[in-house]
Image (tube, rainbow, N blue to C red):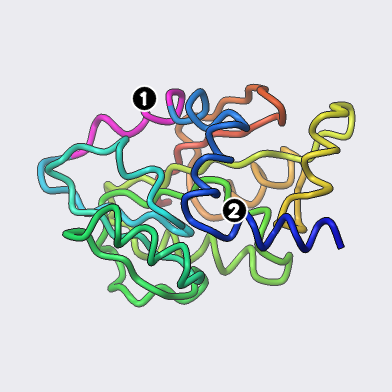
Amino acid sequence: MLKNLLHRIVSNPSVYDRLQIMVGSKQIRQRLSTHLQQLPPHALVVDLGGGTGINHELLSTVSRYICLDNDPVKLKGFREKYPTDFGLLGNATQVPLQSQSVDLVLCTAVSHHIPNEFLTAFFSEAMRILKPDGRFVFMDAVWNPQRPISRLLWRYDRGSYPRPLETLQGLLEQQGKILHHENFSIYHTYLIAVVAPK
C-alpha cells in the first residue's frame, strides 16, 4: 500500500525530478557528462527511457535530442520543459528509427525497469540504431546486497529488476565493444559503460 502511494506521488514529473536530485542524480550526471562531450556538431541523440528529459541539460545545445519513453505523463513533463525538442512515446525494445541513424544512444537508470525476457532486445535495439562510429552510453544502479541503504531504496523503487554488475556488463559485451566502464557508489553502486558497435 505504501509502495503504491509512493509510486503515484512520484509519477508527477516535477516530484520525480526533485526526487532524482535527492538520491544523487547531480553527482551521477557529473560523472556521466564527461562521456557526452565528444559529440559531432548537430549530433542526433536518443535518450531511451528519457522520462522527463533530465539528461537533456548534459548535452550540447547543437545536438538534436529525442526523448523516448513509454510513460505519457513523464513525456508531458519533458515537452513542457523542452517544447522545441522531440518527445517520442514508444517501446525501447522496438525503437521506431532507422538502423545506423543515431550518433549517441543514452540510457540512464532504465534497465532495472525492464523484465529479463526483454533486456537483450533492449540492448540490441540500442546498438541497431547506432551509426558505425556511434556510442551507447549506459548508466544504471546495480544490485549490491551489501549496501543496506541500497536495499532499502530498491524496496521502494518502481523498477523490479535490479541486476548484479557482472550481469549487465556481460549483456553489454554480447551486444557491442565496451570502450570504457566505471563503478562508483553514492547510495547505490552504479555502472557507467561506453559501448561501440561491434
Q: Is residue 34 magenta?
A: yes
Q: Secondary structure at mark 1?
A: loop
Q: Secondary structure at mark 2?
A: helix
Which residue has dot 1 on it? Answer: 34
Q: Main secondary structure of the magenta part?
A: loop
Residue 152, x across and y down, in percent:
84, 38
Which residue has dot 2 on it? Answer: 174
Q: Residue at x 72, y 71 (%)?
A: 117
Contact (Cβ within 8 Å) of mark 1 with mark 2: no
As drawn, 181 above or below 175: above
| Neighbour tally class for label 2: few under 14, some 14-19, many 20 plus, Cα within 10 Å | few
Question: In front: 189, or 87?
Answer: 87
Residue 197, x across and y down, in percent:
40, 51
Q: Residue at x 76, y 47 (%)?
A: 163
Question: In front: 169, or 77?
Answer: 77
Residue 177, x across and y down, in percent:
48, 43
Amino acid at pointer 1: Thr
| Neighbour tally class for label 1: few under 14, some 14-19, many 20 plus, Cα within 10 Å | few
Q: CA distance from mark 1 to mark 2?
A: 25 Å
The disc, 1 or 2, on the residue closer to the chain's N-terminal end is: 1
Left or right, residue 28 beside residue 197: right
Query: Which of the 4 quarters of the picture holds residue 129?
Result: bottom left
State which quarter of the image contains the N terminus: bottom right
Q: Which residues are magenta?
A: 30-39
Q: Residue at x 43, y 58 (%)?
A: 127
Nearer the observer, disc 1 or disc 2? 1
Amino acid at pointer 2: Gln
